[in-house]
Image (cartoon, grey):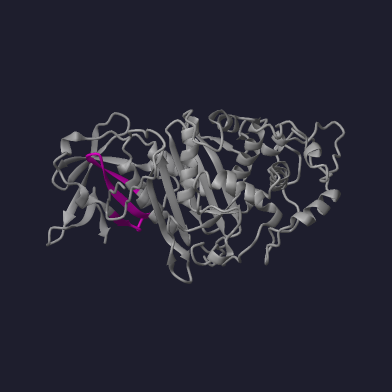
Amino acid sequence: MKKMSFAGILFLFCFQCWGQSTKVDYTDHLKIIDYWLDAQRDFDKLPGLSVAIVQDQNIIFQKGYGFADVEKKSPMKPESICSICSISKLFTSVAVMQLWEKGSLRLDDSLTALLPEYKINQQFIESVPITVRSMLTHSSGLTRDVGDGWNEPNFNFITTEDLKKTVLNLETLYPSSTYFQYSNFAMSLLGEIVASKSGVSYKNYIEENILKPLQLGNTHPYLPENLWRGEMATGYGALNRQGERKMMPFFKTNALTPAAGFSSNVIDLAKFASWQLKLLSNTNAGVLKPSTLKEMQRIQWTSSDKKLTWGLGFNIQYQPSGLTTIGHDGSCPGYVSSVMIDPKKKLGVTLMINAQGVNIYKYSNQIFSILNKEIAGDTTTKNTDLAMYEGRYDNYTFGGEVIVVPFKGKLIMFNVPSDSPASAITEYKYVKKDTFRKIQEDDKTLGQELIFERDENGKIKNTRSFNFKMNKIN
């Protein structure tokens, strides 16, 4: 196992390599990510956060921040299990496509043909049939949810038996294949199709045909009640006006499991991301054929304004920066999560937060932005130790903290809290001992000085730009 460290906290892990990883060295980028996540968790008042980052077949960063259980003061770890809610849909989608590969079903098979006992009233006579494809792309015209499972205090999700009875009174919202309507209900029906066509229960099929082959030992098609408030992190609600978060109770998703009932940790989802990257390189990694995953991650549905694109189970996001990420997020009572890959750079990011009221994409998108941030190195300082300047500096008079990090022979600086640290990085060139100058973005000329001052013991005590000083936070 390869181990590297910075400030005693960064660990790089490698699991069994399934292919050749790229050669980009992200060590300094990971420093920025680590400082930002540590600070942003505090400023956003999150109980806990865990993250894992993969570079092709290697986990290059994994860490937990804060608490898995606030009352017990148990730390959040990369191994901490959380509800992954709608990320469950990816495993259901993979199961459907396995059956498609075997010829057990077709993407244009109708719901009526596959599940005749689920008779839903199609109120639009002009509608085409509800199909497997339209359910995978959330364009089936079916309602988002059935039952009252999302309501407190008990989150009583509908059972499969009651689901069959409930659908008799349901009507479609729209003509099929006409509008996008995110539907947990549709994905639950796909889970029923998996069970019907495979001849085994949905949970057994997932465990035997996906989780075991991919060696995802901490991923389950259920929430493990025996691990709750232990190895499974405790979930908390959104911040109220007093800045507090209420603990959420344990819940069982029942018939909603194919849409929102899985649990996992960031390490397992990182492996799941690496499996995707391996398949996309045309290497047979098992579970699915490479061409099948490519078809799943190809755009199958686009909204009329072109702002929403969806594959077969996968969400496809185009960022203003030109970055394309593919994956899914999850949001359940007490938890938010995401697993996303950048196929072009062969990067994957998975995050879990045991709280609600949080925009998970603020975190995942910024991690990708930092990893893709191009900062030229400075070889003239190769014999100069810049580590002494690294750390947090007090700027609470005007905004918060300033983070200073050595980066390939220069210093970079950014503020926290920040929703977009990648776009607010300032670079400084070493001039002489304790003195740096700002590198202008447009023409790379040198601007104002950044001077570090020392105490009587020779340790850095503050930094000064113009006449403004910021004390180092120890």
Q: Can I make out residue 364 in this image?
A: no
Q: Main secondary structure of the magenta part?
A: strand
Q: Which percent across, then down, holds residue 61? A: 37, 47
- Which is more toward the observer, 399 or 47? 47
Q: Is residue 112 left or right of residue 70?
A: right
Q: Is residue 259 left or right of residue 19?
A: right
For image coordinates 63% across by 44% down, the residue present is 92
How many numbered badges does the structure rendering display? 0
Which residues fall within the magenta stretch? 392-414
Q: Is residue 337 magenta?
A: no
Q: Is residue 401 magenta?
A: yes
For image coordinates 33% across by 34% down, the residue present is 24
- Which is more toward the observer, 393 or 148? 148
For image coordinates 69% across by 48% down, the residue present is 200
Q: Which percent across, then down, holds residue 172? A: 81, 42
Q: Which percent across, then down, holds residue 228? A: 54, 65
Kindly give the residue lying farthest to the bottom in the view shown. Answer: 71
Q: Is residue 332 left or right of residue 283?
A: right
The part of the image, by quadrant, that contains residue 287 is: top right
Q: Can I make out residue 336 in this image?
A: yes
Kindly give the residue lying farthest to the front in the view shown. Answer: 199
Image quarter (top left, top right, bottom left or bottom right) of the C terminus? bottom left
- Which is more toward the observer, 421 or 64? 64
Q: Which percent across, then down, holds residue 468? A: 26, 52
The part of the image, by quadrant, that contains residue 412 is: top left
Q: Is residue 448 left or right of residue 241?
A: left
